[in-house]
Amino acid sequence: MSGSVAILVTGLLWCADAVAPSVPERISIGDVARDLDTLVAPARRLQLRLDVSLTASLPRRGDRAGLSVELATRPDLWYAVGVASGSELTAVEAMSSDGAVTRTLTIQDQAILWSARVFKAIGPLVLSGGVVDNHGAFGIELRGWDDRVRLELLATTAHPLEYGPPSVRAGASLQWRWLYVQAGVQALADRELRAGYLGVGMRWSDPDLLRSLGWLAAR
């Protein structure tokens, strides 16, 4: 695409020179090329990161498969959008006529779970906020060894716009090249819903987003 733009700009400048050769100051092709390069330089610094994961809850069934895409505008700031599917153990409370509260545990199959978060890094500390699996969420992470070792504490609410006791998840992941393993405990504060989880996944990044998407041809 950038080659076509350069050819078009060159043709327009050549026509301008032919029509008005007496103009004392003319824009050079080199100046236009430098201006175009300056314009697209910030977009070239965008980094695309992908994360594919599979997890299983223990001892209760709670399998989950997810895909997350991160778009980093700066080394310390990035955005993530994800989609997942799986099953989730939930508790439904009901009050009887005599005032007694009963709690029923059910396993719900979730066809589509959406996530959207903003991440901010402050040294090895990473803060995040947004939506995780259709729930409002706030996370704190410690990362080291070029982000290959991660310790996470994630608090989620029942609904993105509702306030109440959060569900807390604590976990860790260890990455080797583009493969990683993860483990942790979810629903820490709820004895009935508390469960461990194990998982594997793949993480990789593309340092040149525009070239990978074919928006800008190679020079």
Image (tube, helix red, strand yellow):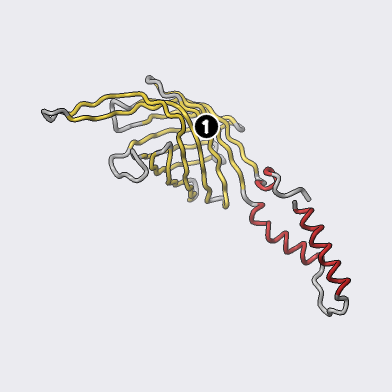
Q: Residue furthest front?
A: 19
Residue 79: image location, x then y, percent: 52, 47
Answer with left or right where residue 26 lies relative to residue 45: right
- Asked which quadrant contains residue 51, the reply is top right
Residue 191: image location, x then y, percent: 28, 27
Asked if 27 appears above or below 77 in the picture, the reply is below
Q: Nearer the viewer, residue 65 or 173?
A: 65
- Asked which quadrant contains residue 138, the reply is top left
Answer with left or right where residue 105 lies relative to residue 152: left
Residue appearing at x 67%, y 48% in the figure: 210
Answer with left or right where residue 69 lies relative to residue 58: right
Residue 198: image location, x then y, percent: 46, 25
Task: Answer few, some or many: residues within 10 Å of disc 1's Cα (few below 14, many 20 plus, some between 14 and 19).
Answer: some
Asked if 169 appears above or below 19 in the picture, the reply is above
Q: Which residue is mark 1?
A: 174
Residue appearing at x 77%, y 62% in the figure: 33
Residue appearing at x 77%, y 65% in the figure: 32
Q: Amino acid at mark 1?
A: Leu
Q: Residue furthest left?
A: 98
Residue appearing at x 53%, y 48% in the figure: 78
Q: Nearer the viewer, residue 23 or 72?
A: 23
Residue 39: image location, x then y, percent: 68, 60
